[in-house]
Image: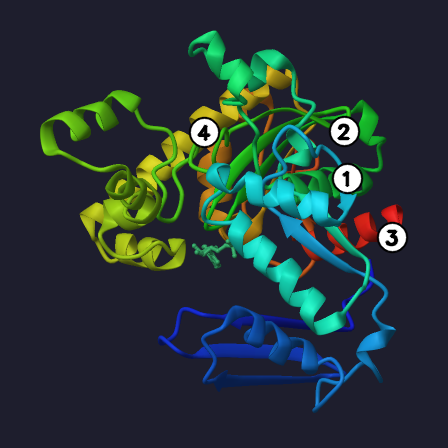
Amino acid sequence: MPEPLWRAALDWTHQQGQVELSASGAGESVQQVLPIADKAEGLEAMVKTLVDGPTQVLDSLSDIDAVGHRVVHGGREYIDSVRIDDQVKAAIQRLIPLAPAHNPANLQGIEAMEGILGDIPQVAVFDTAFHARMPEAAATYPGPYAWVEQGIRRYGFHGISHQYVAQRAADMVGRDLADLKLLTCHLGNGCSLAAVKGGLSVDTTMGFTPLEGLMMGSRSGSVDPGILIYLIRQEGYSADQLDTLLNKESGLKGLSGLSNDMRSVVEAMEQGNERARLAVDVFIHRLRREMGGMIASLGGLEAVVFTAGIGENSPLVWQRACEGFEFLGVRLKDELGRAKEDQDIAVADSRVRALVIHTQEEWAIAQACIGLL
Ligand code: AMP
């Protein structure tokens, strides 16, 4: 896979009214804090580093052939990547209630690019698409039948990443994806698992929203919905308060009281912090439990794949997650360490491979653009 010519990011979390822009290209990298609060303005400053300054890699912005976007929610309508037009934009807008934290930003990005680059082909690659063909039994919630008609169902997310690492895993083990049963573990700030059978997602842990399933950085993952009823009745919680509680104040951050970052929580645990230990224990317990569920949906297992921030970097998580599955023939090497390259961390005679793969969502989106245009 080719290295990107240029890459850039905007970090809005610093100080109000400021954005940190980092860009790399042409063997150089720059980092600067700019007095910008408007998202479109930030994107424009970012795109300019393609044609100006030390990171310049293009003569003109008109050299760009297409722009690909990761769009979080495609609902029932969009189960494949699609060229963006007014109808697609209206659908992303319509789906905002299903992904209030993500779809508005996706739409903003699309419109900002129109403003900066004019009438250029843009492609939406949906994070839900890979899971859109899940069997009905896996996609349906056991609520009233009206939910089925209303589209209250399990959509699943991180699809671009799950799909990419599944294909990469097949390449690494030298087999056809169509013949494999893979458990892909996307463990970053958001965490989800997918059961990938014959190249298709047959089950996943996230659902109607990216809140279901595993414990995450600041999201609770699945909890007894009765807790919400209790909090509403007994403590007068509003929808917004519950939203904040479950999405921003739970998970590693909520239990440890320290951080949503696994690195800080593990560090505190190693220094004897009991709440940090509990947070890590619950994270691992839930991870293993959901891994077991995915393996049952697969009905077998050729490889387990770890990816994203935690999945690519935490030998502790690999070890403790896989400990639960030694009885299935998952056996990891004794010496485990992070690597820049994708790696197989299982011993040679392990019945199941264990792979650490660096997810390349940008590359997968670029490929979708090429495929479509
Ligand atoms: P992502 O959402 O994929 O960017 O992942 C971000 C998360 O990865 C961070 O919040 C950290 O918890 C985690 N992470 C990054 N590096 C490490 C590491 N060396 N060990 C454990 N977790 C890590």
Q: Tags 4 and 1 in contact by the CB under 8 Å rule?
A: no
The residue under label 2 is 199
Q: Mark 2 is on which residue type?
A: Gly
- Residue at 30 percent across and 57 percent down: it is 259
**Quadrant of the rendered structure where residue 27 is?**
bottom right
Give the camera-side residue of 165 and 124: 124
Does label 4 or label 2 sit earlier along the sequence?
Answer: 2
Q: Quadrant of the N terminus?
A: bottom right
Distance between the alpha carbons at the discs numbered 1 and 2: 7 Å
Q: Residues within 10 Å of mark 1 (few under 14, many from 20)?
A: some
Distance between the alpha carbons at the discs numbered 2 and 3: 20 Å
Q: Mark 1 is on which residue type?
A: Gln
Which type of secondary structure does the marked residue at label 4 adopt? helix
Give the camera-side residue of 26 and 349: 26
Task: Determine which of the numbered discs, if any, sits on residue 59 in the image.
Answer: none
> Residue extending furthest top?
145
Does label 2 or label 3 sit earlier along the sequence?
Answer: 2
Q: Mark 4 is on which residue type?
A: Arg
The residue under label 3 is 370
Does label 1 or label 2 sit earlier along the sequence?
Answer: 1
Which type of secondary structure does the marked residue at label 3 adopt? helix
Q: Tags 1 and 2 in contact by the CB under 8 Å rule?
A: yes
Distance between the alpha carbons at the discs numbered 3 and 1: 17 Å
Q: Position of residue 143 (x, y in %)?
A: 42, 12
Q: Position of residue 226 (x, y in %)?
A: 25, 20
- Residue at 42 percent across and 36 percent down: it is 211
- Residue at 86 percent across and 65 percent down: it is 65
Compared with 163, 47 (above or below) is below
The residue under label 4 is 288
Q: Position of residue 149 (x, y in %)?
A: 55, 15
